[in-house]
């Protein structure tokens, strides 16, 4: 006798249900160019996974596919076991809300006409349509507090904020959607060095407090060292190495990874791979700053920041949230 089997829609991928994200054999093309070429990795709940690699290796293309903004020509993207690449219409919109992105350039990501209160209220209306105005105001304050901004910022517009404060607002907007996964595409590289460490600390802190998973995209190995549990090294559309962050940074197996690390200038490299003296794994206060300085433009990775800024290819956080509607 055949037991009753529950109907499982073909968007559900049972094998990856315990992962926040599972990417498998992913291929994404622009015309004939395979920008992502057979990439696979998994991110567990609360885990921070970094994808590193030089400019043009396909990091942002991968991120946009994970966000459901680009469709792969082959392979799978599953979010909490649900196939994002197969989802359509309302299902796709609902899935997209579970993944939010923080862009590199916070100024480009925020509508300059909106106040901070409105900027954070906007995604909240989508995420919690049943909240009353008073309930939303309270939630906006709580979200701002969670990113370290007091209520006095509520009436300000982006041009009245520092870069770091803008990035905090962008993070609050992402959190308003109650995501399981935050995609951080070069989250600090547009910021002043003195502010980078604070934003990195905030991101590390948020993950701990809220159990969020991160897909961190960066050309900056200092940032990666601060935030990542595991690292995937990408080269020409492929992952050439993957492993625990300490292992990849201290004992890389691929020649390409060794070259990436070797390309980080002297002091930075020492902080990066210096293990004990660099306080690896337990960054002391200010450790982030050291990592940031460490990061400084490495030859192989140098052009990443400027290229990644391109607001044209990443319209803006409002429309990114908008696209999640
Ligand atoms: N819209 C597009 N049309 C055609 N080719 C594109 C497009 N976007 C990216 N590419 C190409 O795809 C490849 C991967 O680009 P992608 O933006 O994913 O790289 P990246 O690793 O994010 O680089 P960076 O570190 O500079 O941000 C590059 O060769 C790029 O020129
Ligand atoms: Mg990029």
Image (tube, rainbow, N blue to C red):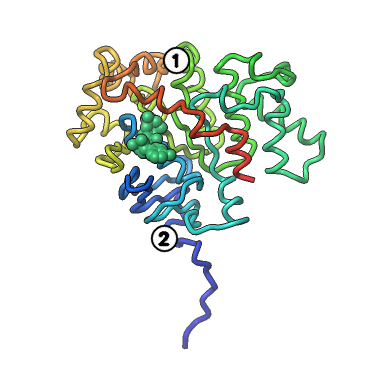
Q: Position of residue 178 (x, y in %)?
A: 61, 41
Quarter, ligand 2: top left
- The answer to whether residue 50 shows anywhere in this view is no
Q: Quadrant of residue 36?
A: top left
Residue identified by numbered label 1: 285
Q: In this rendering, would 178 be left or right of 80? A: right
Q: Position of residue 47 (x, y in %)?
A: 44, 40
Count of numbered badges drawn on the protein: 2
Q: Nearer the viewer, residue 49 or 167?
A: 167
SS label for mark 1: loop
Which numbered circle lies on residue 15? 2
Q: In this rendering, would 292 be left or right of 299? A: right
Outermost residue on the left side: it is 255
* Residue count near mark 2 (Cα–Cα under 10 Å), binned few <14, some 14–19, many ≥20: few
* Relative to 174, residue 190 above or below: above
Q: Position of residue 31 (x, y in %)?
A: 37, 47
């Amino acid at each position: 006798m055949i037991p009753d089997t529950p109907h499982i829609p073909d968007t559900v991928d049972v094998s990856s249900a315990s992962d926040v994200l599972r990417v498998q054999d992913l291929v994404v093309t622009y015309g004939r160019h395979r920008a992502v070429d057979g990439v696979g990795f998994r991110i567990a709940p609360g885990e921070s996974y970094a994808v590193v690699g030089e400019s043009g290796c396909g990091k942002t293309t991968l991120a946009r596919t994970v966000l459901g903004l680009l469709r792969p020509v082959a392979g799978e993207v599953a979010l909490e076991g649900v196939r994002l690449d197969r989802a359509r219409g309302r299902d796709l919109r609902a899935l997209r809300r579970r993944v939010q992105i923080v862009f590199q350039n916070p100024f480009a990501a925020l509508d300059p006409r909106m106040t901070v209160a409105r900027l954070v209220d906007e995604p909240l209306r989508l995420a919690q349509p049943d909240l009353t105005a008073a309930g939303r105001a309270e939630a906006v304050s709580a979200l701002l507090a969670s990113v370290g901004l007091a209520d006095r910022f509520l009436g300000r517009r982006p041009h009245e904020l520092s870069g770091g404060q803008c990035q905090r607002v962008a993070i609050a907007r992402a959190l308003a959607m109650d995501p399981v996964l935050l995609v951080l595409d070069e989250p600090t590289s547009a910021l002043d060095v003195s502010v980078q460490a604070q934003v990195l600390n905030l991101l590390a802190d948020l993950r701990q407090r809220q159990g969020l998973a991160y897909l961190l995209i960066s050309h900056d190995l200092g940032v990666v060292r601060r935030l990542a549990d595991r690292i995937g090294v990408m080269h020409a559309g492929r992952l050439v190495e993957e492993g625990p962050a300490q292992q990849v940074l201290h004992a890389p197996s691929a020649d390409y990874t060794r070259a990436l690390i070797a390309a980080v200038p002297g002091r930075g490299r020492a902080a990066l791979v210096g293990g004990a003296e660099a306080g690896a794994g337990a960054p002391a206060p200010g450790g982030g700053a050291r990592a940031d300085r460490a990061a400084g433009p490495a030859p192989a990775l140098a052009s990443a920041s400027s290229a990644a800024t391109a607001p044209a290819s990443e319209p803006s956080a409002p429309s990114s949230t908008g696209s999640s509607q």
